[in-house]
Image (spheres, grey):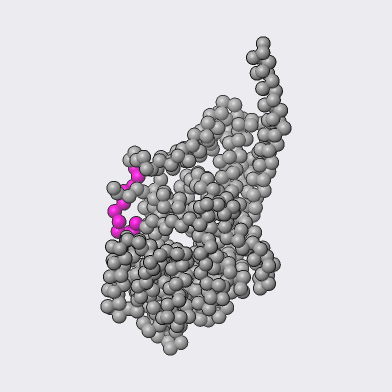
């Protein structure tokens, strides 16, 4: 009898805790996620309307005048052409260094007004020698190219570019074009971007779009193309048109050196030195221009390991920068209240924080928890189904050729949100890995790669994703047995996606 009494007491206690603590807490979490989902939806809807308006405006302009000002009317041999410095930062880029150096040296611009600066932080002596020999080869062809190598990696990319600008020959330059080691600008890149800086002294930055050379390599690169197409065709377009501000992408852009110096130069306090510089320049009153019709070829990370490191940096850095610049943005006297609202709410809070947090919290934690709670927690179906569906369609509209991948793209993004949420919290709290910098691995277009279609090796197993898949599978089985809202359909698909990622069947693997 004592055992039965103890069991009855435990059941009664659990019911009291469930009704008094678990259910109210979970219901509060649902309402918080609903609010964040609606924030994200309204932000996406606003940007979609702006892009539609811009499209109609440009179409009307084209119908009245076929002449489009794309910066190609300027004579590159004109005496007033500004001195341009081209910086190419790299670190052990064995596979791609020839591509970026060759493309930069092939750009059309007066030879006496162009200096190529290769900032090689490589730690491998053999790679350093190869890069230096390549620079010497182009110098032998008459190109003004300088090879710079540091003995330490202080400040990483920001530190390398900061030191590069201190060189005596760099001080004579008015503009600086920046290309990462896997970026290959077309020969007319400077002809299409520099005239905009020359024509308007208030413009600090001209940013070009990224064009992906390996988007068709594997499922992982196709998914990245979908996400980045939205970023460039919507987020950057809207920021440029409505606020003359957007986050500098760190490459494929041209800066006015006076603006760069006015903003305080390169700082290495976060892992997003490019975004840091852009925000500081904007607070000083400088304006940015985005050129969506100018594309620069580059490579997407095709291994899951490289992609995860990149996403950690891209999620942690903005959150850490938001923490450090919140008061500075509020106190800025040169920025209008409208632009402050855009910076703090739209640019940072919704896109860099809420987007990551709500994806993981709602779809990987709250919805499965609601399934386990039975019908005691009210979960509005319009938020669980219609709002995310609308957000997904708005995001995917930019890449119609990949619409057939839409379902897996959603599920994959939900899995990756686990890492993005962790990185965001690390950045907000400035935890141990807040300043971790791992260079994104680039394989080069000529590298032979082997798709991960066979059984994964032990190194391809990702425990966190497998545990997430197991938890979601348990919730799906529970919903099949006891549920009423058919959430098991989503949970089974999401658990399958987590297992696919966990066992390494996304992306490519390097040949051994």
Q: Is residue 272 above or below residue 413?
A: below
Task: Say if residue 402 shows up in the picture.
Answer: no
Q: Position of residue 111 (x, y in %)?
A: 36, 82
- Single out the residue that lies furthest toward the bottom: 79
Q: Is residue 44 above or below residue 190?
A: above
Please indicate whether residue 310 sits to the left or right of residue 320 in the image. left
Identify the residue at image location x=35%, y=75%. 146
What secondary structure do most residues of the magenta stretch adopt? loop
Q: Position of residue 420 (x, y in %)?
A: 53, 50
Please indicate whether residue 324 sits to the left or right of residue 125 in the image. right
Q: Is residue 87 above or below residue 468?
A: below
Start-end of magenta stretch: 443-453
Q: Is residue 416 magenta?
A: no
Write down the quadrant of residue 456 in the picture.
top left
Identify the residue at image location x=28%, y=70%. 133
Task: State the residue in front, 120 or 175.
Answer: 120
Identify the residue at image location x=60%, y=61%. 324
Please indicate whether residue 438 sits to the left or right of residue 230 in the image. left
Write down the quadrant of residue 334 in the picture.
bottom right
Task: State the residue in front, 206 or 151.
Answer: 151
């Amino acid at each position: 009898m004592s055992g039965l009494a103890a069991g009855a007491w435990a059941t009664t206690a659990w019911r009291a805790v469930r009704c008094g603590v678990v259910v109210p807490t979970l219901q509060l979490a649902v309402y918080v996620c609903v609010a964040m989902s609606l924030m994200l939806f309204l932000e996406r809807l606003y940007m979609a309307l702006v892009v539609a308006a811009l499209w109609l405006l440009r179409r009307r302009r084209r119908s009245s005048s076929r002449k489009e000002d794309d910066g190609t009317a300027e004579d590159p041999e004109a005496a007033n052409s500004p001195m341009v410095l081209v910086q190419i930062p790299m670190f052990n880029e064995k596979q791609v260094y020839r591509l970026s150096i060759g493309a930069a040296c092939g750009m059309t611009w007066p030879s006496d007004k162009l200096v190529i600066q290769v900032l090689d932080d490589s730690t491998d002596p053999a790679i350093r020698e190869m890069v230096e020999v390549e620079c010497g080869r182009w110098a032998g062809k008459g190109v003004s190219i300088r090879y710079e190598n540091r003995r330490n990696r202080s400040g990483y990319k920001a530190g390398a570019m900061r030191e590069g600008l201190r060189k005596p020959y760099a001080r004579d330059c008015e503009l600086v074009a920046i290309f990462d080691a896997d970026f290959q600008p077309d020969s007319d890149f400077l002809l299409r971007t520099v005239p905009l800086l020359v024509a308007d002294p208030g413009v600090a930055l001209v940013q070009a779009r990224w064009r992906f050379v390996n988007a068709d390599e594997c499922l992982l690169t196709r998914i990245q193309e979908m996400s980045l197409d939205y970023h460039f065709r919507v987020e950057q377009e809207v920021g440029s048109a409505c606020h003359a501000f957007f986050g500098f992408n760190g490459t494929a852009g041209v800066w006015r050196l006076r603006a760069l110096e006015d903003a305080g130069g390169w700082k290495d306090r976060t892992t997003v030195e490019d975004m840091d510089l852009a925000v500081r320049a904007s607070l000083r009153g400088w304006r940015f221009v985005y050129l969506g019709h100018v594309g620069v070829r580059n490579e997407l990370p095709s291994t899951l390991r490289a992609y995860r490191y990149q996403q950690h940096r891209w999620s942690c850095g903005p959150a850490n920068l938001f923490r450090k610049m919140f008061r500075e943005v509020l106190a800025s006297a040169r920025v209008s209240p409208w632009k402050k609202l855009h910076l703090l709410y739209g640019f940072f809070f919704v896109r860099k924080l809420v987007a990551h947090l709500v994806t993981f919290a709602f779809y990987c934690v709250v919805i499965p928890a609601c399934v386990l709670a039975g019908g005691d927690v009210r979960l509005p179906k319009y938020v669980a189904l219609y709002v995310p569906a609308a957000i997904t369609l708005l995001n995917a509209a930019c890449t119609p050729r990949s619409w057939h991948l839409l379902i897996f793209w959603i599920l994959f993004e939900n899995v990756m949100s686990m890492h993005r949420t962790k990185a965001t919290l690390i950045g907000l709290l400035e935890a141990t890995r807040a300043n971790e910098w791992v260079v994104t691995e680039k394989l080069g277009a000529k590298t032979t790669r082997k798709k991960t279609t066979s059984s994964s090796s032990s190194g391809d197993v990702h425990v966190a994703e497998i545990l997430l898949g197991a938890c979601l599978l348990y919730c799906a089985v529970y919903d099949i047995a006891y549920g009423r809202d058919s959430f098991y359909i989503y949970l089974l698909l999401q658990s399958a996606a987590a297992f696919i990622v966990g066992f390494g069947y996304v992306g490519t693997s390097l040949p051994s």
